[in-house]
């Protein structure tokens, strides 16, 4: 019986976590879009490619970092390339492979989107959670999913 109660609690947390995630992402997406900026998925790609002073990544590496399905990532990269934010280059030593890197326009876009993204997250989470609750939530989510890299939003 105790195990069944625990499972019920875990499922209750799961539902609340998914609903909270969906609500926050929808609100942040809408706020960023209202400012005429690209979707936050674009920002996530730009951020990954800007790390370590700008890096080249194979699509498969990028897919693992972003946890995006390959077919979705391919279309996303096509749109971002068409917008001039990224470019595909031949992979050294592998004639069939390709690397993705930021363009100067991509770097500028990442820097332009960040303030709107940051403000939207603050406006979505900040009013409802005092600082001590934010710290506790970060600790709990870290226990579930591991810790994010430092400077995730720079």
Image: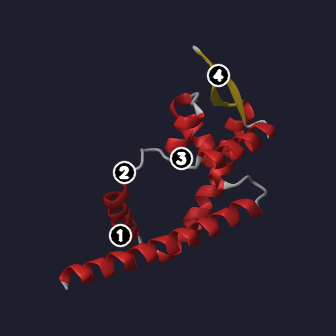
- Say whether disc 4 or disc 2 marks the residue closer to the N-terminus: 4
Look at the numbered discs 2 and 1 and tell me whether their residues touch, using CB distance below 8 Å: no
Label 3 to label 4, Cα distance in Å?
23 Å
Look at the numbered discs 4 and 2 and tell me whether their residues touch, using CB distance below 8 Å: no
Check disc 2 and report its element: helix, strand or loop.
loop
Give x and y (percent) for residue 56.
Answer: 58, 27
Sort mark 1 into few (<14), some (14-19) or many (20+) by Cα contacts within 10 Å.
Answer: few
Q: Which residue is mark 3?
A: 66
Label 4 to label 2, Cα distance in Å?
35 Å
Label 3 or label 1, whichever lies nearer to me, is 3
Q: Which residue is mark 2?
A: 147
Q: Which residue is mark 1?
A: 132
Look at the numbered discs 3 and 1 and tell me whether their residues touch, using CB distance below 8 Å: no
- Say whether disc 4 or disc 1 marks the residue closer to the N-terminus: 4
Check disc 1 and report its element: helix, strand or loop.
helix
- Say whether disc 2 or disc 1 marks the residue closer to the N-terminus: 1
């Amino acid at each position: 019986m105790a195990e069944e109660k625990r499972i019920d609690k875990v499922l209750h947390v799961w539902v609340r976590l998914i609903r909270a995630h969906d609500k926050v992402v929808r609100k942040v997406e809408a706020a960023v879009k209202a400012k005429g900026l690209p979707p936050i998925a674009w920002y996530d790609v730009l951020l990954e490619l800007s790390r370590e002073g700008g890096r080249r990544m194979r699509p498969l590496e990028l897919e693992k970092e972003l946890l995006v399905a390959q077919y979705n990532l391919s279309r996303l990269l096509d749109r971002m390339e068409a917008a001039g934010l990224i470019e595909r280059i031949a992979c050294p030593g592998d004639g069939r492979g390709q690397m993705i890197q930021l363009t100067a326009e991509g770097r500028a876009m990442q820097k332009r989107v960040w303030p709107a993204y940051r403000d939207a997250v603050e406006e979505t989470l900040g009013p409802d959670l005092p600082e001590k609750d934010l710290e506790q939530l970060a600790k709990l989510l870290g226990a579930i999913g591991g810790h994010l890299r430092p400077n995730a939003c720079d």
